[in-house]
Amino acid sequence: MISLGCAKNLVDAEVMMGSLLKEGFEITNENADADALIINTCSFIDAAQEESVDTILESAEFREHANSGQALIVSGCLSQRYRKELPNLMPEVDAFMGIDQVEQVGDIVRQAVGNRGSRLGQAEEKPEPDEPGAEEEEELPPPTPGEHKELRQQAAKAEEFYDRLQRQVAEADNLRKRLAKEKQDAVRYANESLIEQLLPTMDSFEMAMSAVRNGDDSTIDSLKTGIEMVHTQLKRTLEEVGLVEIDATGQAFDPSQHEAVSRKKTDEADEGTVIEQTRKGYRLRDRLLRAASVVVAAPSGESEETNEQ
């Protein structure tokens, strides 16, 4: 059994396999060894319909080379939706069953296997025209006007279904290309929003550098104030996109957040307490970006500072 599409199809497939096992059938994972192959289809979207049609045609072609006696059964949404049209469009399929026939799967499989065997038997018994004793086929009478009309209607309907199938395949191909392009653009411009928020900070840095080039010694204080303002602006922008500063000083050493660069003896803090932060750490919301580099308090009995790295 091949199950395509949504999780509901998987549930239906399990129900069908359970029913078949209960009726004495054997389930095999090798398609070539099976007397019957059930393709549980989906037609919720155009891409699912395309996948279902491709799988049916590929399975029919595989059957001709691997196991010509295998019965091919199509179930699921596609069979339910186009129950009247599919037998004419796909004569290679031995049986179609809708989603309302799941409980009848055993009878449908038996009938499909029997019909498949009969079709093969008739094909083998049919004499070739060149074989001795082959009877000449009886000449059929010409079709009546009513039969002509019915044939034209069926031909028009088949053409309509074929055009619809072609449109669905084209729409599915266009959808696949559009989704691929959108995914590529999303990766390429993933940081667009962050960069846009950082542009005012870049403008502030450029104004500060311009002030340094054009100023004199009296502008040092104003430059210091400007740099502090730019730093505050940058910090606020990063915090708005989820950046969190790790404040380790005075906290118990946490290996998941802190990176110990040394241990220092002290009587002013308990052992394992961070007494100095040499480099700040940061998190992006709940994800650690960089651990804080810290100095950890050691027992006062140690003779000297020890380096951990």
Image: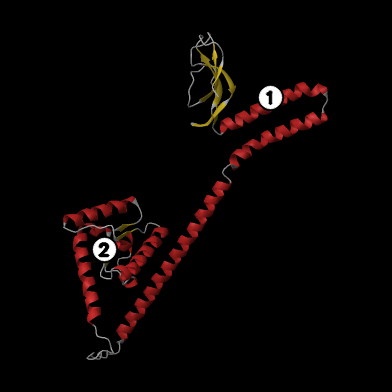
Above or below residue 142? Residue 62 is above
* Residue 73 relative to residue 156: left or right: left
Task: Name the quadrant containing residue 206.
Answer: top right
Mark 2 vs mark 1: give the one in front: 2
Q: Which residue in the protein does label 1 denote?
A: 228
Q: Considering only order in the chain, which callout, 1 or 2, is on the residue closer to the N terminus?
A: 2
Q: Residue at x 51, y 58 (%)?
A: 177
Residue at image point 29% right, 62% down: 31
Residue pointed to by mark 2? 33
Secondary structure category for the residue under label 2? helix
Q: Is 73 located above or below residue 268 in the figure?
A: below
Instruction: Check the image and report above or below for 100 versus 294.
Output: below
Residue 89 lies in quadrant: bottom left
In this rendered view, identify the residue nearer to me: 234 or 113: 113
Q: Residue furthest front?
A: 303
Q: Indicate left or right for 31 with 278 as reference.
A: left
Amino acid type, callout 2: Asp
Give how far across and how far down residue 198 sits, in percent: 64, 36
Q: Position of residue 76 (x, y in %)?
A: 30, 59
Nearest the eye: 239 or 264: 264
Q: In which quarter of the image is the N terminus?
A: bottom left
Question: Can see residue 306?
Answer: yes
Task: In the displayed orientation, state which residue is furthest to the left.
Answer: 23
For mark 1, give the secondary structure: helix
Query: Where is residue 73, by image quadrant?
Result: bottom left
Quarter of the figure with the C terminus: top right
